Amino acid sequence: MIDSDDSFDSKITIGGYNSEKFGAEDSELAWHDLKPNKDGLFNHWRLDMTELTFGEYKIKDTAITSVIVDSGTSLLLMPEKEFKKLMELIEYKADIPYSLTNDFGLQSFPCFKDSTY
């Protein structure tokens, strides 16, 4: 919990959470069971994924059955077929070019702090 602005105090909570800081008023946190990898190990924060949506649009015929949640990850990977479908939806909905090719030859989507899609 380090902030580049030294005027803010950083805190870390181990073994719980501050209910006054997380979630909307009169709401509860949603808890999810973790899903093991193909070897039966729980080596990531892997969750079941039953559908892939963007707003009110559902991407059909997806091969994705789980997702790894990690707030520290710079890149999120997904099969090319689903990526292209998702980027086409974003391009249609947000009226912006949907992908760039990065230095590794992978397609990527630029996210900006002040963007809303």
Image (spheres, rainbow, N blue to C red):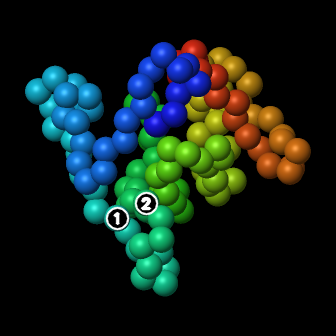
Using the rendered image of the protein, determine whether residue 112 is visible from the camera's viewpoint: yes
Q: Are the two marked residues, 2 and 1, in contact with CB atoms closer than 8 angstroms?
A: yes
Residue neighbourhood size for the residue with mark 1, other residues' Cα within 10 Å, grouped as few (<14), some (14–19), many (≥20)? some
Q: What's the residue at 45%, 40% (across, down)? A: 53
Left or right of residue 87: residue 7: left
Residue closest to the eye, 53 or 11: 11
Using the rendered image of the protein, determine whether residue 93 is visible from the camera's viewpoint: no
Left or right of residue 18: residue 114: right
Q: Is residue 42 above or below residue 19?
A: below
Q: Position of residue 54 (x, y in %)?
A: 48, 35
Tag 2, which secondary structure?
Answer: loop
Q: Earlier in the sequence, mark 2 or mark 1?
A: 1
Q: What's the residue at 46%, 47% (across, down)? A: 52
Q: What's the residue at 16%, 23% (across, down)? A: 25
Pointer 1 residue: 34
Q: Position of residue 39 (x, y in %)?
A: 49, 84
Residue closest to the eye, 16 or 33: 16
Q: For residue 29, which quarter of the picture?
A: top left
Residue closest to the eye, 50 or 31: 31
Q: Is residue 40 above or below residue 7?
A: below
The amino acid on which the numbered mark 1 sits, given as a three-letter code, is Leu
The amino acid on which the numbered mark 2 sits, given as a three-letter code, is Trp
Q: Residue furthest bottom?
A: 39
Residue closest to the eye, 63 or 6: 6
Pointer 2 residue: 45
Left or right of residue 37: residue 29: left
Q: Position of residue 11 (x, y in %)?
A: 37, 35
Find the distance from the CA under tag 2 to the CA under tag 1.
6 Å
Q: Which mark is residue 57?
A: none
Q: For residue 46, which quarter of the picture?
A: bottom left
